[in-house]
Image (spheres, rainbow, N blue to C red):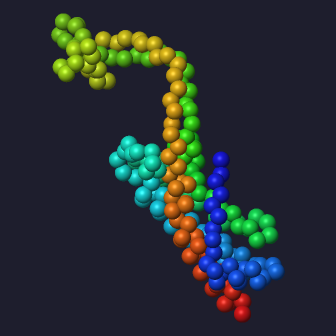
Amino acid sequence: MPTTLKIELTPQAQKLVASMQTLPGRVMDAIRLGMDQANQIALGKIKSEHLTGQGPFPVEEHKLGRITGRLRGSVYASGAQQTSGSQVDSAIGSNVIYAAIHEFGGVIHHPARQAKVRHKTDARGNLVKQLSNEKLLVFAKAGAKRARETTVEIPAHDTTMPERAPIRTGIAESAPAYTRNISRQILAAWKGLQ
């Protein structure tokens, strides 16, 4: 589900673009170059401010904690391309399967299933209860010799994931970098044409 960010050029760059009937190829190249530069700034912001730290974070911070670094390392920017006329498109995203649920939110359905659990036992084979709450049992570690294995039924249930939008938030926060870089490249290309 792509989100579009409208980039405002500086007034000087807007006048320059408006005065042209058709944009020369060098100006379009300049726009692509400026967008690619700004994409790298946005990527840095996303990775350093929205996909890092020890979570969980409040939803309104648009931030995800870093556990393995897989999502953070997968975020990339596609090269800017002229799609039609004077339109240049680019994208920032991730190919990690769980990126979309964190970005856009949604409901995850978990079907009913069975699972095996191992509880710790004492020397006589009695289940060991937690000291802080005697209604709860102590789970046994994988290699524990004194343990009792039980099969439990886990009913079907849904988990609602909130929309955190770390990528879209980082792009929106980088809007000034897009304005600055694209405008600067347009003005430089125009000076080169004269």
Point 58% across, 70% down: residue: 178
* Residue 186 in the figure: left or right of residue 152: right
Q: Which residue of the protein is positioned furthest toward the right in this rendering? A: 21
Where does residue 9 sit, x and y in percent of width and height?
A: 63, 75
Task: Kindly tell me whether residue 34 is visible in this rendering.
Answer: no
Relative to the observer, which residue lies in front, 37 or 145?
37
Point 42% across, 57% down: residue: 49
Q: Which quadrant, please, contains the C terminus?
A: bottom right
Task: Kindly tell me whether residue 4 is visible in this rendering.
Answer: yes
| In this view, 86 is above or below 113 | below
Relative to the observer, which residue lies in front, 153 or 175?
175
| In this view, 96 is above or below 136 | below
Point 56% across, 76% down: residue: 180
Relative to the observer, which residue lies in front, 41 or 62?
62
Q: Quadrant of residue 109?
A: top right
Where does residue 12 sit, x and y in percent of width and height?
A: 64, 83
Q: Which residue of the protein is positioned furthest toward the bottom in this rendering? A: 194
* Residue 126 in the figure: left or right of residue 59: left
* Residue 132 in the figure: left or right of residue 118: left
